[in-house]
Amino acid sequence: MDNLDKTNDERHNVIQNPYSKFIYAIRSPETQKRYPRRFKPFLAYANISGNQIEDQLLDLYTKAKSNPRWLQETIINFMILQKDRVSRGEIEASTISNYYKPLKLFCDMNDILLNWKLISRGIPRGRHASLDRAPTIQEIRKLLNYPDIRIRPIVSLMVTSGIRIGAWDYLKWKHIIPVEDESGNVIAAKVQVYAGEPEQYSAYTTRECFLILKEWMEYRSSFGEKVSGDSWLMRDLWKTTNLHFRSRLGSARHPKKLKNEAIRTILCRALLQQNIRVELQEGQRRHEFKAAHGFRKFFKTRCEKVMRPANIAILMGWDLGLSSSYYKPTEDELLQDYLKVVSLDLLTVDESYKLKNDLTKYEQKNQDDIFLIKGKLQEKDEAIRLLSDQFSSLKIVVDQLINGLSTSRDQDQVDSVIKSLYSTGLIQKNS
């Protein structure tokens, strides 16, 4: 009975915990990590006590409940300070909303009533779209040369499917499903993104990327990992050199899932070491393109050259709003639209694969040309045969005519020979 009371007390404490209520309202795991970090500048400004974020938010909650007006004035003064930073060029205007949103969510979830219309009135709107760009295909190909064997499957999948970096936390080998044509050849692969989650959706990746992923899984298997459909698509590294045979086969048998934070670290490190990105200088706040999200922008930019915008949005996991209730393309329609991009090599990241693709197309064109030439030659041979048959028929008739005329002066016989010539079609009556 005491244990039951203790459990009920613990549940009650969780419900009453201001931090737990705040986190409860955030669905995305990545946002759950990001929002508390954005709280820290305000907590420091407001002189909130506590070593852990849970303790600090409890202190903030206690003070706000006893004096809501204090919190409202403190937030306004904090926002004025941030506007001054915008004027000095220290931060972008859009950054202020990053401080505002978690504060409002915390107050909403903990029944702290403030005049948010008054608070938000002075907050600058900022840009809706950032000024960064997508990476170029040359930069992507240079990135693929980074010595970490995981970089090719990571970059290839993100570039060709447009998935968010957070999707790696859910991706397993069974979520990459090859798509075959009528001849049994792999032409693409379906990607089940956020499988089992409310945000689940389907995307596609190229045949090239599927082969890269397959090669990566086979490489892991060759070192002793028991690869199955439930194997995480991206894992930690293991020692592959200076090992005895038995050690070599056992070193990879205990894989650990590589989370999206680690993947982001790999990408940032690779961009720097491949000299694609340089360290930010004093006064600079952003790189030319985002390490992970830039691939998503690359995907969308390339797809927009030939695909329907609504189909792109669906393949990127976006909500179409009211249109989603009426626009219902089939999986095959989405695939065929996606294959238009693939056929133009707009998503081909490996240059060697592109060259091989070009060679295959060239060879196919040559085969088509050879087939066409053979067809033309066959038509000419048939025409020559027909002419030869007609000539033989003409020769027989002419011989008959000559023989007939040479042996008889009978006009009826001459008329009969002429009639035979008409019947062959070799001569025609004058009109």
Image: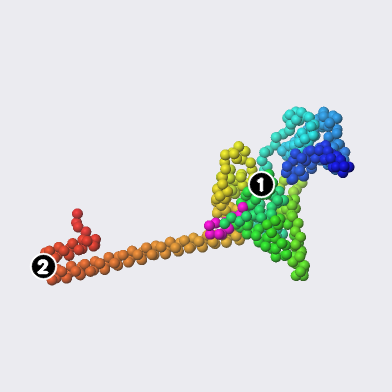
Queried whether the magenta region covers residue 189, the answer comes back as yes
Quadrant assignment, res 12 = top right
Eye-nearest disc, 2 or 1: 1
Q: Are marks 2 and 1 in contact (CB under 8 Å)?
A: no
Q: Is residue 161 above or below residue 383?
A: above
Residue at position x 47%, y 61% in the image: 368
Of the 4 image quadrants, the one containing the C terminus is bottom left
Q: Residue at x 85, y 42 (%)?
A: 4
Where is 156 relative to 47, above or below?
below
Residue 57 image offset from top left, x and y in percent: 83, 38
Q: Which residues are magenta?
A: 181-190
Residue pointed to by mark 1:
200
Q: Which residue is mark 2?
A: 409
Along the line of sight, which residue is nearer the eye, 101 or 26?
Answer: 26
Which residue type does callout 2 highlight? Arg
Q: Is residue 421 left or right of residue 360?
A: left
Q: Is residue 261 visible?
A: yes
